[in-house]
Image (cartoon, rainbow, N blue to C red):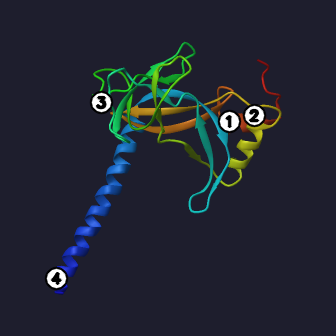
Amino acid sequence: MNRRLLFALFVVVVVVQLAVAGGAIIRSELALRYGESVRFRVQPVDPVDAFRGRYVALRFDNVGAVLPEGLDLPRRGWVFVPLVEDDDGFTELGAVSLVRPATGPYLRLRSGVEYRDDEGRRMVSIVLPFGRLYMDEELAPETERAMWRRGQREAFVTVLVRDGFGVMKDLYVEDLPVREWLAQGGADRPPPTP
């Protein structure tokens, strides 16, 4: 092959890679700067990723969305899910739609498996894209141990949402950011009684 052609192909590959990475960074930064804040209840676990380090993996409560009768979803297709605030100020998933909501925060997510809930409603499972909070090597296992020591703690994450894209901002334990909660000895306090 001609050296100029190889060099041109190399430049194209580099530009495409930079564009993809830059687009993801810009999208995240826009959500962090201008996004609307929502809160999701979570249950933490503490795994390790050999390539990316320690993180607190989060299991979200309420990861099913109502599927309106008559709406047929493409298998593993993209859907729009409005975010609705419950009576306690936490976020729940609204009814899925194939059309972007005109108002309010929403996420653009992949639909999962259809099922019926206990009330007989059509539901679809949803996988939220922000299930890992990366922390330093000492803080992640300390967070996991502290949250589960002597009973489960009330925990939630804040997520900033903009144009269907969400970025996790922070983990809160007993209404405090996790780092502040640990610094104040939250791990040594008994969990609140229900």
- How many other residues sit within 10 Å of disc 3, few (<14), some (14-19) or many (≥20)? some
| Label located before the other in sequence (4 or 1) | 4
Mark 3 vs mark 2, foreground winner is 3
Q: How far apart are marks 2 and 4 (CA)?
A: 62 Å
Q: Do the residues labelled 4 and 1 touch (CB within 8 Å)?
A: no
- Look at the numbered disc 1 and give the secondary structure of its residue: helix
**Vertical placement of residue 187 versus 57, above or below:** above
Q: Name the residue under label 3.
A: 98
Q: Distance between the residues labelled 3 and 1?
A: 41 Å
Q: Residue at x 82, y 30 (%)?
A: 189
Mark 3 vs mark 1, foreground winner is 3
Task: Say which quarter of the image contains residue 74.
Answer: top left
| Residue 11, percent from left and from top | 24, 72
Q: Do the residues labelled 1 and 2 touch (CB within 8 Å)?
A: yes
**Vertical placement of residue 180 versus 8, above or below:** above
Which amino acid is tagged 4? Arg
Locate the N terminus and report the quarter of the image it occupies.
Answer: bottom left
- Look at the numbered disc 2 and give the secondary structure of its residue: loop
**Vertical placement of residue 68 versus 145, above or below:** above
| Label located before the other in sequence (2 or 4) | 4
- How many other residues sit within 10 Å of disc 4, few (<14), some (14-19) or many (≥20)? few
| Residue 110, percent from left and from top | 39, 39
Q: Name the residue under label 4.
A: 4
- How many other residues sit within 10 Å of disc 2, few (<14), some (14-19) or many (≥20)? few
- Left or right for 56, reference 11: right
Q: Mark 2 points at which residue?
A: 184
Q: Which residue is drawn at 50% across and 23% down?
A: 92
Q: How far apart are marks 4 and 1 (CA)?
A: 56 Å
